[in-house]
Amino acid sequence: MKFITAFFMAWGNFITLPCPYKKWDGGLKNMMLAFLPLTGAVIGSIWGLVIWSMRSIDAAQPQGLAVPSPLAAVLAVFLLFALCGFMHLDGFMDCNDAILSRRPMEDKQRILKDSTVGAFAVVTLMFLLLTWYACMSVCWDKVPCVTFFMIPVLSRSLSGAAVMRHRPLGTSQYREDYRQPGKWKWHVMNGVLCAICVLPALALAYRQSFLRPAILMIVEMAVTAGIAGRYARRQLGGMSGDIAGYMICWSEFAGIVTLTVTAGN
């Protein structure tokens, strides 16, 4: 029963779709983080299905109907962020506001929790979304949909592992769970669930002659998430949910850029 509760806690927190089972247990936060790959699988499945549907409409072109590539790119980018309520973009913006202020750490931590939006957040968000749009315009109809499915699975697995592993900020909602005994098993569960989702997807990518780009995407996402997380923790003094969102946005950015480069060659 705890596993069911933890999974739907993750659903209710990180997916905007209506949660079928609403129950909260504050002692299951680490288990909830272990289920992040499955929330990514839900998001990735819907995202991939919508992209596949737009491709099918474009291929069939009934009565001249087709989805123009610019519109398809906008819809694909919007949907990925909308399915999680834009919360990871919020963390990305907060972290950039704090880090790029170049102020002492105490001021950066204060800026991180400030609800107002600063110039650095706006500028970095603009360039992030512009790059996402440019990439999706190129690759939305050239990359196997199963590869898109893997992006939110991997990014959430990496960020969930980082939240469990690294010392949290004093203001983080996860500070009370950091020293919970037996946390190693939730790390293992996170990795196993990620593998269960990703390995069949890799097999399908292999069947579609897209295995090497998919593996390169995984490597780039893991490296980028690691670098972004380490940099943000050193700048801000610890781990937090905002930094997890920062890691997700950077790793997914690396994933879509890698797919665009490989699809364009």
Image: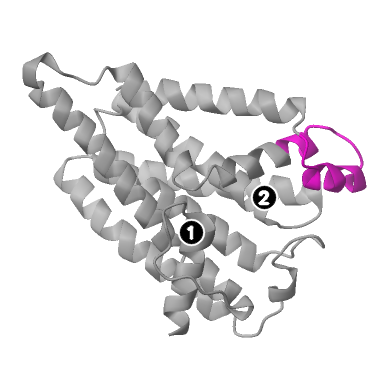
- Which class describes the residues within 10 Å of circle 2: few (<14), some (14-19), or many (20+)? many
Q: In which quarter of the image is the N terminus?
A: bottom left
Query: Could you tell me if residue 58 is visible in this image?
Result: yes
Tell whether 48 sits left or right of 257. Answer: left
Q: Mark 2 sits on what residue?
A: 243
Magenta portion: prevailing SS class? helix
| Mark sitting on residue 157 | 1
Residue drawn at the location 26% of the way across and 46% of the way down: 146
Type of amino acid under label 1: Ser
Residue drawn at the location 30% of the way across and 29% of the way down: 140
Residue drawn at the location 24% of the way across and 58% of the way down: 200
Determine which quarter of the picture holds residue 195: bottom left
Q: Percent x, y for residue 96?
A: 72, 36
Q: Percent x, y for residue 154?
A: 44, 53
Q: Spatial distance from mark 2 to mark 1, Cα to Cα?
A: 14 Å
Near-viewer residue (31 or 151): 31
Determine which quarter of the picture holds residue 107: top right
- Which class describes the residues within 10 Å of circle 1: few (<14), some (14-19), or many (20+)? many
Disc 1 is placed on an element classified as: helix
Q: Percent x, y for residue 19?
A: 43, 62
Tell whether 263 sits left or right of 116. Answer: left
- Is tag 2's residue or tag 1's residue first in the polypeptide sequence? 1
Residue extending furthest toward the top: 64
Type of amino acid under label 2: Ile
Near-viewer residue (55 or 186): 55
Question: What span is in magenta?
Answer: 96-116
